[in-house]
Image (cartoon, rainbow, N blue to C red):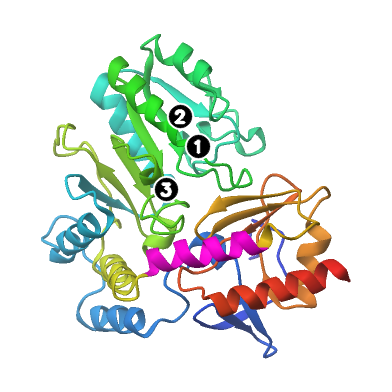
Amino acid sequence: MKLFDVYPLLNIEPVRGEGCYIFDSEGNQYLDMYGGHAVISIGHSHPTYIRALTQQLEKIGFYSNSVLIPQQQELASRLGRLSGCDAYHLFLCNSGAEANENAIKLASFHNGRAKVLAMKSAFHGRTHGAVTATDNPQICAPVNSAAHVTRIPLNDLEAATRELQTQAYCCLIVEGIQGLAGIYTPQASYLQALRKLCSETGTVLILDEVQSGYGRAGKFFAFQYSGIEPDLITTAKGMGNGFPIGGVLISPVFEAKYGLLGTTFGGSHLACAAGIAVLEVMEQEHLVDNAASVGSYLIGALNKFSALKEVRGCGLMIGLEFDVPIAPLRKKLIEEHKVFTGTSSNKNVLRLLPPLSFSKSQADQFLDKLDRALKS
């Protein structure tokens, strides 16, 4: 049996990771500026993380949500305290797509409406409801009918006002920072206006923080720069540092009913052990503050590169836009300079999403390698 093709593959086989570096089967060391799609939050093979998963697996790795799993409440309590969202309730699942699916469904249950207001260029996942809200016809099959979804430009308040005033939408879903699109950030004033409009029209406001959350943007969640409180917050990627886990933070205004949401694997003993270890390391090593300070340093230095058309983002979620497609540059960075970077749906944008433990000295390493790659 052959594997079904998913992505075009780099001819590299990572066999070991340590901090912000990965090592391939031929012994080469790479600076990881991509974190495996922004998943590696606390760094590769962190000893606290390894110990937590090993110790949990020696006890029990999994049982269904039909029994008490105290680790779930520990994870929820830690997450509430560190994120500043302690008033919310936590639903645990396995991925960002699942989190967004459940958030949209919960919004529809809440107000009885069926339409979704989403952003142009948005990405919310590849499962049925999530991909319908995603603005990419290439990954939407005919069965993923978008008849109930309207898309508006990010930061276009007039368009949002016009649509929301119809009071036809169960929810408005927006990314804390649009990642795959090429790192585009909602303006603080825009999010504040959306919060007000959603409250006035009975529309549920969903902040998709799957990629931009968990400290990546220099605050625990990117929307926190605007000072608003969403109704639902979705998270995943950095939540488990590579172990599949996702979640929906649910405002207490939502009525909880048995059977409304459910999952077989979500919130397993092992998944929670991973999630707790991530939060423990984030707190002990001040990784949210580190993402903010190192990210600011890196962005400031990148803005001095004349070859760059624009530098976007905040914290360690950065997009570098050039006047030409970045594929040759990315290839050169990987093959000649041993640096992993990411692409986006904008062929001219290089994405940088290193672990939150990324240091200033590693930033300097990257800046030097980028400079040499551009000059050559």
Q: Residue at x 38, y 63 (%)?
A: 288
Quarter of the figure that contains the C terminus = bottom right
Would you call the spot at circle 3 few (<14 residues within 10 Å), some (14-19), or many (20 or more)?
many
Q: Which residue is mark 3?
A: 222
Does 208 appear above or below 242?
Answer: above
Q: Marks 1 and 2: in contact by CB < 8 Å?
A: yes
Range of magenta residues? 287-301
Q: CA distance from mark 3 to mark 1?
A: 9 Å
Q: Residue at x 75, y 60 (%)?
A: 305
Q: Residue at x 44, y 81 (%)?
A: 45
Q: Marks 1 and 3: in contact by CB < 8 Å?
A: no
Q: Which residue is mark 1?
A: 186
Q: Element under label 2?
A: helix
Q: Element under label 1?
A: loop
Q: What numbered label is drawn on residue 190?
A: 2
Residue 353: which quarter of the image?
Answer: bottom right
Q: CA distance from mark 2 to mark 1?
A: 6 Å
Main SS class of the magenta portion in the image: helix
Q: Element under label 3?
A: helix
